[in-house]
Amino acid sequence: MVDLTNIVSLCKRRGFIFQSSEIYGGLASVWDYGPLGVEMKNNIKKSWWQSMVYERDDIEGLDAAILMDKDVWRASGHVGSFADLLVDCMGCKKRFRTDLLILRQSQDGKCPECGGDLTQPRQFNLMFKTKVGSVENQGDEIFLRPETAQGIFVNFLNVLSSSRKKLPFGIAQIGKSFRNEITAGNFTFRSREFEQMELEYFVHPEEADKWYEYWLNERLSWYSKLGMNKDNLKLREHEKKELAHYAKRCHDIEYNFPFGCSELEGIANRSDFDLRQHSSISGKGLDYYDEGKKERITPYIIEPSGGVDRTFLAFLIDAYREENVRGEKRVVLGLHKKLAPIKIAVLPLLRNRTEIVELAKKILSNLKKDRRVVYDDTASIGRLYRRQDEIGTLFCITVDVESLSDNKVTVRDRDTMKQDRVSVDKLEEYVEEKMEE
Ligand code: ATP
């Protein structure tokens, strides 16, 4: 298993992730995605959206606002109970969530890091507050959403009536969420600003168990279809005492991170809690008329809720490998084709030969229409290959002196390092085929 420090350093060095406001000393647990990071993050979101919305007939998309009426958070229970119980170590001053200490079996009242004494648990509400209105010190206090799910629940009727869906159907959303995490850390794993990919799947209460099992399997296989090693994934069912106030049942999909197995995504049976709560506080009936059964019901909700940032980190860790190639270390990010930030690098073998550069630029401009392709001539070919391997680029296309006479270029595969000589006219087709494989 790769050391997290290797990942952190690769992310900074190659432009995947930077600390927020770094030149001012850095804002703790807030992260910026650099040129490669934003590509990979977009690819993750695209793959999720593809599998949740485009490949199905029963799910619609939504993009609700981050700011919502304060009563939403009263109804959801976040105002009253979205708080962590925390303890501080009087020795090393580290802070821990008591629920995580229980999971780590550290219940002896001592710090799991240094063995020091712990304070009594204290409550911290995790929601960020802000104000609506332009006059200083006036206006209504509202919250930055701590989850995207509530934007879906309050739009249940809007989506239902505009899309004419029948049960079972789902609403999918990807968006930013904010939590004032006190025990932040482990790089991007626990951030204060992060993105969630959430599906709320509305079902007849009698079918809730069936759909719960269905989504457990669907979601697990999404990660492995995108290349994540199955041995690093684990399903863990929540014990009764661990369940959130709205949940009847919950499983976590955990990933074997270098700092231990931890949650990537939660799949919960939220019952009819949310729709009933919003009905009761807003006064609007959020129910559904089942024409088949001729009855009015409040649907149950099965929720697969994942984090973009944790998924990103897990895919990076999973893809990272160091190999020995003819006595030299080669770092490769073996990312799935769909996730790799750069698909192709075009590399002229001689940067001072005008014809070679011209041909390379022509290839670049043809290929980049449909995918992310880069051009690099700033080092020797061996160095250029290593640079591209380290960021997971799928193919390197090299233009050499021979290309000028035979109109062929060398295409090198990231994983096998095998090289094919391909006619320039057939490149587009060749790449398409490889991307489909
Ligand atoms: P944890 O117990 O690790 O704090 P959680 O159970 O509170 O997580 P959920 O409320 O179930 O998390 O949120 C759904 C998903 O959103 C999580 O599985 C995770 O991928 C992501 N997520 C939640 N909090 C954070 C965070 N602070 N930073 C990054 N991702 C997060």
Image (cartoon, rainbow, N blue to C red):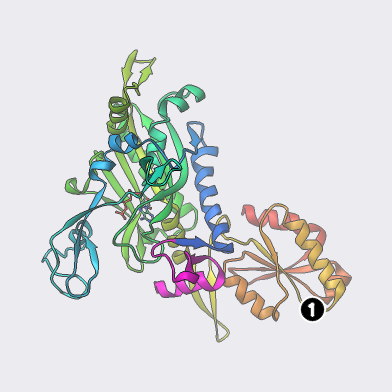
Spot occupied by residue 250 in the image (x, y as percentages of width and height): 28, 44
Residue at position x 46%, y 43% in the image: 134
105 vs 215, left or right, is: left
Residue at position x 42%, y 65% in the image: 27
- Extreme residue in the top direction: 294
- Please tell me whether residue 7 is drawn above or below residue 315 in the rendered image: below
Residue 24 inside the magenta-drawn segment: yes
Number of callouts = 1
Spot occupied by residue 386 in the image (x, y as percentages of width and height): 61, 76
- Residue situated in front as seen by the camera: 32 or 112: 32
Spot occupied by residue 99 in the image (x, y as percentages of width and height): 20, 56
Whether residue 220 is visible here, answered yes or no, is no
Spot occupied by residue 120 in the image (x, y as percentages of width and height): 12, 61
> Considering the numbered disc 1 on the image, is that residue within a helix, a strand or a loop?
loop
Boundaries of the magenta span: 1-30
Q: Which residue is mark 1?
A: 350
Type of amino acid under label 1: Leu
- Extreme residue in the bottom direction: 327
